[in-house]
Amino acid sequence: MEDRDFVVGQEFPDVKAFRSAIKEAAIAQHFELRIVKSDLIRYIAKCAAEGCPWRIRAVKLPNAPTFTIRSLDGAHTCGKNAYAGHHQASVDWIVSFIEERLRDNINYKPKDILHDVYEQYGITIPYKQAWRAKERGLQAIYGSSEEGYYLLPVYCEQIRKNNPGSVAEVFTAGSDNRFQRVFISFYASLKGFFEGCLPIVGLGGFPLKSKYLGTLLSATSFDADGGLFPLAFGVVDVENDESWMWFLSELRKAFEMHTEIIPHLTFLSKWQKGVGDAVKRKFPACCHAICMKHLSESIVREFKNPRLVQLLWKAAYATTASAFKEKMAELEEVSAEASKWLQQYPPSRWALLYFEGTRYGHLSSNVKEFNQWILESRELPVTQVIEQIHCKLILEFEERRARCKSWFSILAPSAEKHMIEAMNRASTYQVLRSDEVEFEVLSAERSDIVNIRTHLCSCRDWQLYGLPCSHAVAALISSKNHIHAFTAKHFTVASYAAAYAEEINPIPGKIGLKKEGECETTMDDETRTVRPPKVRRPPGRPEKKRMCVEDLNREKHTVHCSRCNRTGHYKSTCKSEDCKSIQQM
């Protein structure tokens, strides 16, 4: 506070600097300020408290913007007790206070603003004021939502210009060019997918929370080490059947630009809003599975029983018909209602045993991991959301290119670990050779038939995961074959390096884009200007799902029926046949 004391003759660069200094002093020293006169050449103010003699006067020096204090009268007798809702702590003042913090942390919450203001100045401000300051601060740093749509055409053009071969297109609706959709896929991602990733595509949507809402649609894959590999993404005004049909159509076009023959792909999604029909129409030769993570979350949300999730996953991973039936019977025993509910999702869409395509052990998509990239920035303008993804892609590609240079094995680390474990188990097996390619492998628990020519094992692990199982490893070692020659190429370090070989180049910042936009929109303003969609976020602070940490850690209570001995319902709501006969008696 001593640093904010004033003296006669003290000078300030201009009137704005003086006004900022006097406001800062009033807030820090807890007195309210009443402005008597304030213009470009003079400033007179006094303490707002009744009877307090403190008064200050400052004027502009001739022929210079400098302001100087001419007089400073009296000392405060008011007690300096302005602690709650200080009038000088306006939204603009809070914005100036939080701007640097907001640059460093987009997720700087209003409650953190309240805490920091109180810690530094000892005053309390309303929560709504902190929230408004954050909104205004984000707009000052990242631009308005309207500006985000206005810059989209230029931004997409810069993507294509700086990253040749990339796809970046904006789609509008109506004669007034209202934003409808934008699709983006970088050349490095497309090339990396076809040269080094698993032939798996995860699909998902993530709601945005900017002024005009919207949904981020994304397509992701897995690299050789099982890591997230973003393939393409887009923003749509509304997520529905039509928008998913459009997204899959654009994705196919992007694929066809980079390959003559689209490989046999496996799509993973939660079957939301027309995804199934879109995949069937745009990729008719490909397989489509339900994301197991979504299915397990749905069943636990519906029936509140974690035991069902365990049995569902065991059934999904079952490699024999008997094992699958056993787990499904256990699930029905725990909850007949859950078993009936699960019938809407045929096993051919989620169970390893019955799914026609190959998922290489990935039963769930990694779209949620991709969504985490923009979790903190989904309230920003659309161009800033895209730029967050772009910057993250640059960083991830650089880091992973450098990382794989230190790998000296043939397979990526996760696959190499799998093979080492398989070799350890194989050392305990007995191998009986039938001919050049077929073997019988005996273990303590079972006997399995391995065919090294067709890459098949009766345990089904080899064909389901793409890596030789322990039985196959035993047969390969016995026949003096090189184990790594029989692994799918998708798991090699070479494939990993190929996936990230292409660089993603940066794009000019907001100021650079503005200059480009100004030059180009003057020529054809009406055709290039993209206006925001008509859908707007409701006024006020967006609702957020709040979860108590204690509730998350607390063990969930499972209800139990005392009549039929099953969980999921009470005695009074029991519908089993035995209970009905007891009630009739």
Image: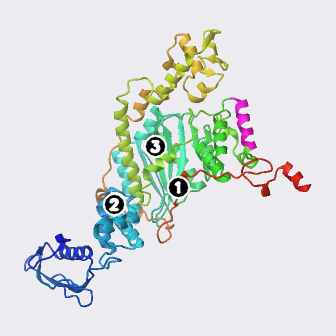
Where is mark 1, residue-wise? 550
Q: Does the magenta stretch include residue 325?
A: yes
Vertical position of residue 514 compared to residue 261: above or below: below
Give yes or no for contact between labels 2 and 1 (Cβ–Cβ under 8 Å): no
Q: Is residue 568 left or right of residue 55?
A: right
Please tell me whether mark 2 sits on a helix, a strand or a loop: helix
Where is mark 3, residue-wise? 230
Q: Is residue 44 left or right of residue 197?
A: left
- Front tag of 2 and 1: 1
Q: How crowded is mark 2: few (under 14 residues within 10 Å), some or many (20 or more)?
A: some
Q: Earlier in the sequence, mark 2 or mark 3?
A: 2
Magenta range: 320-333
Q: How crowded is mark 3: few (under 14 residues within 10 Å), some or many (20 or more)?
A: many
Please tell me whether mark 1 sits on a helix, a strand or a loop: helix
Q: Which of marks 2 and 1 is nearer the N terminus?
A: 2
Where is mark 2, residue-wise? 102
Vertical position of residue 567 compared to residue 266: above or below: below
Q: In this view, does 471 lie to the left or right of 42?
A: right
Q: Where is residue 101 in the image (x, y as percent from the top left)?
A: 31, 60
Give yes or no for contact between labels 1 and 3 (Cβ–Cβ under 8 Å): no
Q: Where is residue 453 in the image (x, y as percent from the top left)?
A: 59, 17
Amino acid carrying label 2: it is Leu
